Image: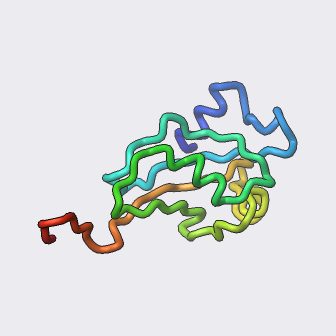
Amino acid sequence: MRPSEKAFLVSGGPVGSQCLRDREVVVERYQKEKQLPLLDRTKFLVSQDSSMSQFVITLTRMSLTATQAFYLLVNKGLPSMSMTVGEVYRDHKDEDGFLYVTYASQEMFGCCFSVGSMC
């Protein structure tokens, strides 16, 4: 059992019983991620009509540098940001009824130049 599942069980069961149009999403940091901080919470109740890009906006409250990219992975793949949370949930939900999403960063875009400096 994942630690996230234990948290749901301790808190009184899945939050999905609160609203039938919302989906339970558990967001975990990629185990080899060293740059991004842990989120202040890992359990989210997300409207199934929200796009994945809207969900990413909610998650990117953390500070990213100018050269970092933020990725959401579902079952070790990148979901289309135009898909709704409901579509991703339907295609990738776990047998326990939760959608598990992993976040990670990657350094990219080359280096950032400032006036008078070189990388």
Q: Quadrant of residue 2?
A: top right
Q: Is residue 7 above or below residue 95?
A: above
- Residue at position x 50%, y 44% from top? 61
Classify the position of the N terminus by image quarter. Answer: top right
Q: Is residue 40 above or below residue 86?
A: above
Asked if residue 115 is positioned above or below residue 20 in the image, the reply reads: below
The residue sitting at the bottom extreme is 110
Of 9 and 83, nearer the camera is 83
**Number of dots carrying numbers:** 0
Indicate the quadrant where residue 30 lies: bottom left
* Residue occupying image coordinates x 49% and y 34%: 40
Q: In x, y percent, where is residue 34?
A: 31, 53
| View extreme (front): residue | 115
Q: Is residue 63 left or right of residue 61?
A: left
Query: Does residue 28 appear left or right of residue 35 in this picture?
Result: right
Direction from residue 2 to residue 85 in the image, left or right: right
Above or below residue 61? Residue 56 is: below
Residue 113 placement (x, y as % from top left): 22, 68
Which of the image's four quarters has the C terminus?
Answer: bottom left
Q: Is residue 77 left or right of residue 51?
A: left
Give coordinates of residue 97: x percent, y percent.
Answer: 74, 48
Foreground pick, 108 / 105:
108
Q: Position of residue 71 (x, y in %)?
A: 49, 62
Residue furthest out toward the right = 20
Which image quadrant for residue 81?
Answer: bottom right
* Colouring scheme, one of rainbow, by chain, secondary structure, one colour: rainbow
